[in-house]
Amino acid sequence: MHALIVTAHPDQHSHTHHIVSQVAQGIAAGGHSYEIADLAAEQFDPRFNQADFDQFKSGAPSPTDVLAEQQRLDRADALILVYPIYWWSFPAQLKGWIDRVFTQGWAYDDDGQTVVKKLGHLQVHLLALGAASQRTYVRRGYFSSMRTQIDEGIFGYCGAPVVTSELLLPTDENYPDAHYTLANQLGQRLFNVKEMA
């Protein structure tokens, strides 16, 4: 089976990229294949432009960069997002990737009365890397808000089941090694996992 790992962090030496590497190693060790979409390195343009709007409004063809990303996803059995938390959500580049790639007609159909969810075949695994303490996330309700916005609002709307939704923090015991172990184990068990969230 095949996984697409998507990340958006400009520093190749970041904790985020180390997590991506461990997930990839785990997938390979589990006997499966993967592709990494490094949106920062690839300079993916996250700006929702006129062509994107025309596709949304009238069903015009998607721009070629969007089609290429959809083809990556079409090849995948699992989508893994590994991202730093910026202002309690995705980095802008990753949010723009979602905005542009998860299009009407490809990710879902909505005729104003009925929504057809089209991504039920794609299991989703989310690894969010925060900088605050667990206490802050709990006290303010940030992680539950993120789950509502991302897990339900994006992937639930498109029918893609969120199998893993992890919040990894620097206050976690045995940081950062525990994060690398978790990421590697997730990769190894990726296509055996039924529900971790």
Image (cartoon, rainbow, N blue to C red):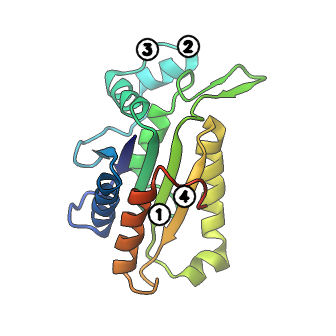
Which mark is first along the chain, 3 or 4? Answer: 3
Please identify, in this view, whether the residue under mark 3 or under mark 1 is nearer the observer. Answer: 1
x then y, percent, for residue 21: 27, 60
First in sequence: mark 3 or mark 1? 3
Please give the label number shown on residue 61: 3
* Callout 4 secondary element: strand
In the rendered view, tell whether residue 53 sits above or below residue 138: above
Q: Which residue position is annotated with label 4? A: 164
User: Where residue 32 appears, x then y in whole percent?
Assistant: 34, 46
Q: Quadrant of residue 177?
A: bottom left
Q: Quadrant of the N terminus?
A: top left
Instruction: Decide if residue 152 is on the left or right side of residue 72.
Output: right
Q: Which of pointers 1 and 4 lies earlier in the amino acid sequence?
A: 1
* Label 2 secondary element: helix
Q: Residue at x 64, y 77 (%)?
A: 138
Image position, residue 18 (x, y; %)? 28, 66
174 displayed left or right of 141: left
- Describe the element under mark 1 as helix, strand or loop: strand
**Amino acid type shown at disc 4:** Thr
Numbered label attached to residue 128: 1
Tag in front: 4 or 3: 4
Residue 7 in the image: x percent, y percent?
Answer: 35, 52
Q: Amino acid at mark 3?
A: Pro
Depth check: 8 or 166 in front? 166
Verify CB contact (< 8 Å) between mark 1 and mark 2: no
Kindly report the distance in space between the C-alpha atoms of the residues bearing marks 1 and 2: 34 Å
Residue at the spot of label 2? 58
**Kind of element beneath mark 3:** loop
The answer to whether residue 46 is left or right of residue 109 is left
